[in-house]
Amino acid sequence: SQQGEEDPQALSIQEGENATMNCSYKTSINNLQWYRQNSGRGLVHLILIRSNEREKHSGRLRVTLDTSKKSSSLLITASRAADTASYFCATVLNQAGTALIFGKGTTLSVSS
Amino acid sequence: DVKVTQSSRYLVKRTGEKVFLECVQDMDHENMFWYRQDPGLGLRLIYFSYDVKMKEKGDIPEGYSVSREKKERFSLILESASTNQTSMYLCASRWTTSSQGASQPQHFGDGTRLSIL
């Protein structure tokens, strides 16, 4: 069951530019998480935002959550070539410790 | 840092074989997960385990089974491998309490790329 859908599917930018990825989901959530995956590697957790939070920052990352629109966005400021990766949003539906439901991801390419 | 280790990065097996994928985590996490990742389909949950000897089916359990005899180790078993099980398999673990489990990040291994010929 696909809960989250990222948009766009692919994004190409130059170093120094900002990258924005969006995630929409279908049902009410406990929290939403963003992960990064470098080519051929596992996923790395970036940031978690709870349903009662609207915005969160971590270094060059800014995540927003709009529960009324059932959407979230991930902004990476001043992108670097090392940010080239796939980015996934994942949602947790309730407090029972259920597994994450992942979207299909956005592939970000940052060229120097 | 949490370390999740998957026993093989690449594996080639033949149809009909019984295949074991092993995953070990070093942080005493209660929850462990197995996903498969396919192009255009994203990550899909196969099985997860809340604790030792406990398991729950995910979205696509058919053709798979799991074993969790010790807290640190979670094994995925392909009972009789088929070509449609060629995929990238990812293991993850998560620390949890009854009230905080859903709010904890998952920690992933580097994956096993499995080819069934």
Image (spheres, coloured by chain):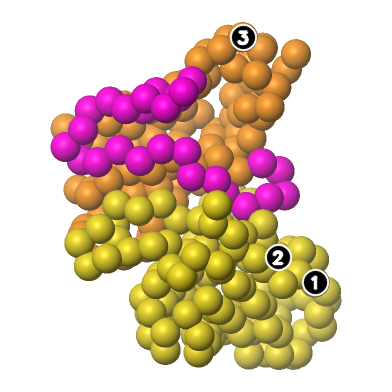
Chain colours: A orange, B yellow
Q: Name the residue under label 3.
A: A16
Residue B3 pos. (x, y %): 59, 59
Q: Residues within 10 Å of mark 2 (few under 14, many from 20)?
A: many
Question: Which residue lies at the image location 54% right of the left edge and 57% below the top edge?
Answer: B2
Q: Is residue A76 visible?
A: yes
Query: Disc number at residue B71?
Result: none
**Is the C-beta separation of discs 1 and 2 under 8 Å?**
yes
Specify the subunit that label 2 lies on.
B
Residue B40 pos. (x, y %): 59, 49
> Which amino acid is tagged 3?
Gly
Q: Is residue B92 above or below residue B83?
A: above
Same chain for mark 1 and mark 2? The answer is: yes
Mark 1 or 2, nearer chain start: 1
Specify the subunit that label 3 lies on.
A
Specify the subunit that label 1 lies on.
B
Residue A13 in the magenta stretch? The answer is no
